Image (cartoon, helix red, strand yellow):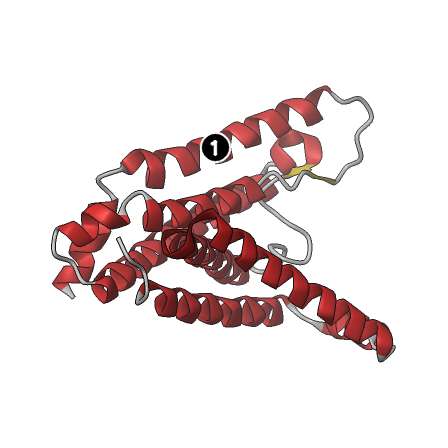
Amino acid sequence: MNTLVNVARYHLVDRLQFLVLPVGVTFFAFLVNLTIFAVIPETPEENYSGGLFTLYVFMLVCGALSMTKSLPFGLALGVSRRSYYLGTILLVTGLAAMYAVGIVVLQAIENATGGWGIGLNYFRVPWLLDGSWYLTLLTSFVLLTLMFVYGMWYGLIYRRAAVLGVVLFAAAQVLVLVGGVLLLSWTDSWPKLGTFFSTLTVGGVTGVLALLVCVAGVGGFATMRRVTV
């Protein structure tokens, strides 16, 4: 366990990447959205910007960098691949928990101020982060973890097979999606899919996201064992 903690601390040497930039980018996007909706005349009472997803995208980038920029030196220090991977997972759970708590607190302030006085819903996202505070906390935590772990997998694919590997990895996922679309069309299952999503609760969405975290985590770990540095 001490080794995993040391790996997490190793990553946090770069506080700019893991702490400063995610928070800074999120609040910069928030200020931009706040300014835009404040100057737009006759805006509706409920405004949704979607700008919060900049944080999730940045978590994806951080995950990729943790397996590309930081990996060679970490292994050179004598850390095993298994310890490096699990230590990075420990780091992301801590970061995701911290950022999820921040989202819940800011969402509460947003609700109490009537959307920052202009009806802006920046930290409340319809259908996804729009339930009780504990559901928002759990969903934010799982989604942040998913983005980071998914980014880790991309970073490991890059370490294993360079740009070509990343392109093929992305292309394979696109083919799976296209195959799913064709299958739904051929079997006339689009109405059933629509019914499924219409009945899916926030807790159900979180469960699906948690399953994807497991898939990305296992896939990344399997790739990690084959990475050459």
Q: Is residue 33 visible?
A: yes
Q: Please identify the quarter of the rendering in which residue 115 is found.
A: top right
Residue positioned 63% across, 22% down in the render: 35
Name which residue type carries label 1. Val
Where does residue 205 sit, x and y in percent of width and height? 61, 67
Where does residue 111 sit, x and y in percent of width and height? 60, 43
Q: Report the front residue among 174 and 211.
A: 174
Check disc 1 and report its element: helix, strand or loop. helix
Answer with left or right where residue 133 lies relative to residue 198.
left
Above or below, 106 against 38 in this view is below
Where does residue 71 sit, x and y in percent of width and height? 27, 50
Residue positioned 53% across, 59% down in the render: 169
Residue positioned 81% across, 77% down in the render: 192
Count of numbered circles in the view: 1
Residue at mark 1: 25
Q: Residues within 10 Å of mark 1 (few under 14, many from 20)?
A: some
Answer with left or right where residue 176 lies relative to residue 23.
right
Point out the image quarter for the N terminus. Answer: bottom left
Q: Report the front residue among 99 and 5.
A: 5
Answer with left or right where residue 103 lies relative to residue 51.
left
Q: Is residue 114 visible?
A: no
Which residue sits furthest top? 39
Above or below, 106 against 201 in this view is above
Where does residue 152 sit, x and y in percent of width and height? 40, 55
Above or below, 200 against 61 in this view is below
Above or below, 162 against 143 in this view is above
Which residue sits furthest bottom? 187
